[in-house]
Image: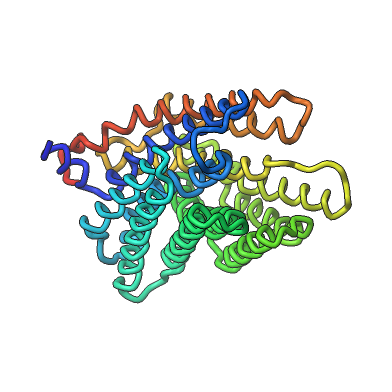
Amino acid sequence: MSRLWSNYTAASHRVMFLPGALLTVLAMLWWLLDLESRRAGGAGLGDLPGPALHVWWMLYGFFPFFIFGFLFTAAPNWLNGPAIPRRAYVASGVLMALGALLVLAGLVVPGLALHLAGWSVAVWALFRTLTGAPPQDKVHPAIVTAAAALGGVGDAVFLVWAGADFPDALRMAEAIGVWGFLVPTFLAVCHRMIPWFTSRIVPNYVMVRPYGPLWGVLAGCLVHGALEVMERRELLWLVDLPMAVTVFWFATRWGVARGAQQVRLLSMLHIGFLWLGLSLLLYSLDSLARYGGLAWNAGHAPLHALGIGYFSSMLIGMASRVSLGHSGRKLEADATIWGLFWLVQGVALLRLLPDLLPGLPTLLISLAGGLWLLAFGVWAGKFAPTYWRPRVDGKPG
């Protein structure tokens, strides 16, 4: 047992990715069972509304494990600064995992409190690394640290809603989770890593990473979130259209046409990034329809294009890369990883259809959830053992 614990805690990504992989499957299984219970006329699986807890699981429940696991590994390298101490990443991972398990067991308020405590430890560790690094360009590490702090605020707001049933807090927690935490984090990582990875593979490639457009999209995210909280969705197109144009401009300048034809791990990042632009475009069309008084709306399609299409695609690409490289394996996506990536693309499209074409049966939602379980269940089965086993190359970490 001590050997397993030693292997598991040897690197920060191990401590975070293992519970993240398991919770990705358990959270969707919980949601599908809750959904079927309510369809059958039941009250769902818990005291709190199932859709609200589904929001928490998708925004705060499992993505942060992969985000912190990646940032604990990448941020010190970006900064050439102090590594995240073992006591910090172990405390953070254990507290967040125990909190999530309590939520899953129905002890929502104590679980959320424990989860928030672990989140706070993670943010403080990132902040210490940021401030302890030598003077240099710290834009990307600063953005992801600030986004993680905002995510902690959103997690706390959700705790307030769960404990005090303050109605506006749920809408605020969702807006902060999406537009203050997840989109800024994924965008900053893409802005730094996609051009860099592409430059390592594509010949005669020129890296384009201007900060001006990045700051513009980040500001647009905050405005979008504020408009969501104020329930002024008819005005979202004013920020979402410019953001969509900027995202597609980034994709073009980063060489999506060439990058998507290269090795699979790089192709995943280029293809996955396009979902961010598509999501913003769907948000814009929905907003313009509301602004013009039309009967049509996009429903939850823009949000699922963002969550399943963008976040989940990038998760498969980035987490697979970290898991392969830091277990001593070749940075090559085999047929299984490549197939799972494309399965996630299919899940995203399938989940969008009932909202964009209301005549379709809602059973497609459950089908999409089942395919999600298949995709991430296979992914977890493939990589989970690498988190408690030593590296295959015999190196530490």
Q: Position of residue 212 (x, y in %)?
A: 59, 68
Measured along the vertical axis of the image, is residue 370 above or below residue 239? above
Is residue 320 toward the left or the right of residue 162 in the image? left
> What residue is drawn where x is 41% and y is 27%?
377
Q: Nearer the viewer, residue 57 or 10?
A: 57
Location of the N terminus by quadrant is top left
Q: Position of residue 170 (x, y in %)?
A: 58, 54
> What residue is drawn where x is 49% and y is 50%?
194
Q: Nearer the viewer, residue 312 or 100?
A: 100
Tell me where residue 389 sits by quadrant. top left
Tell me where residue 134 sits by quadrant. bottom left
Is residue 285 toward the left or the right of residue 121 in the image? right
Q: How many discs appear?
A: 0
Q: Position of residue 263 (x, y in %)?
A: 46, 36
Measured along the vertical axis of the image, is residue 11 above or below residue 391? below
Residue 331 seen: yes
> What residue is drawn where x is 25% and y is 61%?
83
> What residue is drawn where x is 21% and y is 46%?
9
Is residue 303 toward the left or the right of residue 231 in the image? left
Q: Position of residue 372 (x, y in %)?
A: 51, 29
Residue 271 seen: no
Q: Residue furthest bottom?
A: 135
